[in-house]
Image (cartoon, rainbow, N blue to C red):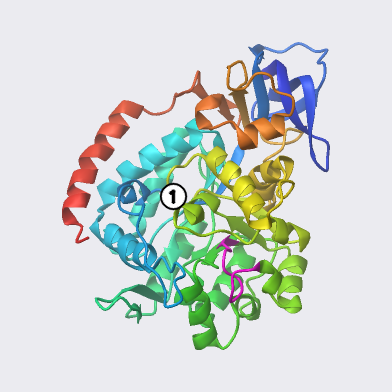
Amino acid sequence: MVTEIHNGTVIAWDGTKHVVINPGVVVFDGNEITFVGAAYDDTAEEVIDATGRIVMPGLINSHLHVTDTPFTQGYLEDIGDKGPAGSATNLVSLYKVLPEVRHATDPDAQVAAAECAFAELVRTGSTTVVELGYDYEVGGNGDIAITERVADVAGRMGLRAYSGPRYRTRHYGQSPDGSVFYEDYPDKGRARFEACVDFCQQWNGRYDDRLRTMLAPGQVDTCDAELLKETRRIADAHRLPIQLHAGQSPNEFRRVGVTEDRTTVEYLDECGLLGPDFIIGHGQVMSGDGDMNSMASHEVAALRDSQTTICHLPWVKARRGGVINSIQKYKDLGIRQSLGTDTFPFDLFNDMRMAAVVCKIVEHAADAAPSKDVFAMATTGGADALGRPDLGRLAPGCRADIVLVRIDTPKAAPVYDPFKFLVLTANGEDVDRVIVDGKTIVEDGRVQTIDVPAAVSRLNKASKRVWARLGL
């Protein structure tokens, strides 16, 4: 069916960048965009009036965790500890609270969490999401059936999702004396790795190709070189993208230096992971002092020339008292970047705002991280990281993943620069309609593909038994 969206302020793609057409028209036939421009002369079977709306490409949330995040709310905020020099280490949140919460969950609780998380994601304009599942820290002891159930939730809800169940050599935690311990799994995680690879092969392309899979080795300090090299071999053989957590904490950077006698970037490069299909989730601490300008020239060249993407998660970093130093530096170094929410809230508008504002603070410059660049990180940046030139853009030949954002409100009016409004003022509650693969799954701000009140009830019930198990 041919559908025309007209009378809106359209964020179009001109082949190299996002541009504004006001008023503009977007036409799609089935799940493919066929026309973007100022006027459409043919007829359409359905017409959507976008008066008072920005018509933009769906956001690409390229790093998040849905199975445990809802249970961490109230436990991760306003906590921390200090290192010997008074700097924040965040050991409590990363090495104690998160493992405790994951141990306390069970499969049904994880599915209930996923239902609400996916509903929030699509409600707030994320049309493509990258869900990174957990390993043995979660109830079910790494059973891949949990990943299958969560992927099924995303598929049935109508989202475009990449599912990456995680695997690793060892796990970590915080000892009673406050130190961090690392402990190998009995088989160094190989059985879990094989199960994840099988899942990726069996589930890739389901739900009319809206569900795809990726390889997701765990944190860089929890994976041995053999596992990472085998990850690259499987990725190349089956054309699967890869995402790995790295640059997450100073402790991690030091650990890699001790165990591998290399920096994080050197280790990833030696294992063959760097490439246009490889995403580094976090990327906050890629040098000893966390300043991107402190990376050696060969490290910068390795990241830039391989076209590796750094996926930034600015809100979760700011919430823990940290910053990315910085998004502007990464851009100036020519390194690709995308955005994700990681945890709560799953509103990528919130992370766009944090990315822009925190970068300005770090750089002491109001013109750092301009809104148009940050919007690109949340759209084409994520699409390019996934190898999807058909996503994150409103242009003929792209998938019909389209979001309508209200600008007929006192908060919005008047809109002189749509990019500045979307990045610095809007939030997910301004989203009016969401179309994924040509199908409307949010209309008038309400998710159409799931009973949201029932899902909220299931999650509230699950939270009581999860919290009852916590030893915090």
Q: Is residue 312 depicted above or below 15 in this figure?
A: below
* In front of the other: 432 or 458: 432
Residue 51 image point, x, y percent: 67, 13
Where residue 23 sits, quadrant-wise, is: top right
Residue drawn at 70 percent across, 41 percent down:
371
Residue 240 image point, x, y percent: 60, 60
Residue assigned mark 1: 343
Residue 180 image point, x, y percent: 35, 77
* In front of the other: 247 or 59: 247
Classify residue 240 as left or right of residue 120. Answer: right
Whether residue 268 is in magenta: the answer is no
Q: Secondary structure at mark 1?
A: loop
Whether residue 287 is in magenta: the answer is yes
Classify residue 104 as left or right of residue 194. Answer: left
Q: Is residue 46 visible?
A: yes
Report the quarter where the N terminus lies: top right
Residue drawn at 25 percent across, 32 percent down:
457
The magenta region covers 280-291
Q: Is residue 57 visible?
A: no
Classify residue 375 as left or right of residue 12. Answer: left
How crowded pointer 1 is (Cα within 10 Å; few <14, some 14-19, many 20+) is rated as: many
